[in-house]
Amino acid sequence: MDKIDRSILFLLQKDGKITIKEIAERLNLTTTPIFERVKKLERDGYIKSYKAIIDRKKVNLQLVVFCNVTLNLHQTDYLKKFEKDIQQFPEVAECYHVAGMFDYLIKIYAQDMERYQDFLSNKLASLENISKVQSSFVMTEVKDFSYLPIP
């Protein structure tokens, strides 16, 4: 991957609807090599998909929660089961297996505190092997960027 590929990725991250022609104009190239490069970046897995970024507040998801989860048992089978089970919940936007004081960091969107409590009590707590859950509620989104700083 060279400087042009990095520039293409940067532009596509900022605006997934940008046209090949617009990319070519910004990079002072013709459309054919840009088109070929984008297709290669897609084939090689650099570009995984194209998505719309939805304003969560417009769809009434007012609450953002970061939830730390600790498991009782840490054998591979238990980790895999938790990772499989957590994916069934649409409230869970992101889930990371982390090192440190907790085993997993989960990002959850909910309409309000009542809906989060329902998620916590009836969904998350129903999973086996959970020892401890600690929730942190977002008060203000200071920075929410949806692109990677490509070196």
Image (cartoon, rainbow, N blue to C red):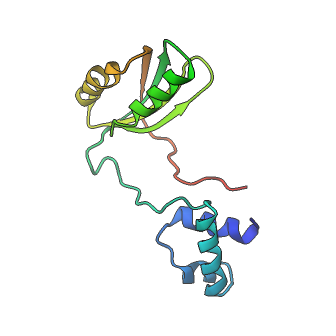
**Visible in this render: residue 67?**
yes
- The residue under the point 30% across, 42% down is 61
Which residue appears farthest toward the front when viewing the image? 77
List x then y, in percent, for residue 118.
24, 25
Q: How many marks?
A: 0
Horizontal side, residue 40 vs residue 87: left or right: right
Image position of 120 (left or right of 71): left
User: On screen, 69 above or below 45?
Assistant: above
Image spot of residue 26 (x, y percent): 63, 78
Residues 151 and 119: in front is: 119
Query: Where in the figure is residue 100, as x and y percent of width and height?
Result: 62, 20
State the quadrant of the N terminus.
Answer: bottom right
The residue that appears at 36% across and 21% down in the rendered structure is: 127
Q: Is residue 93 left or right of residue 9?
A: left
Location of residue 139 with respect to 133 vertically, above or below: below
Which is nearer the eye, 19 or 112? 19
Viewer-closest of 149 and 139 = 149
Specify the quadrant of the image occupied by residue 2.
bottom right
Image height of 70 relative to 5, above or below: above
As drawn, the residue found furthest toward the right would be 2
Q: In which quadrant will I find the C terminus?
A: bottom right
Based on the displayed image, in which of its 4 quarters is residue 39 positioned?
bottom right
Expressed as whole percent of the image width and height from the top left, the position of residue 13 reads 55, 62
Residue at left 55%, top 80%? 20
The residue at 51%/78% (across/down) is: 19
Quick check: can you spot residue 139? no
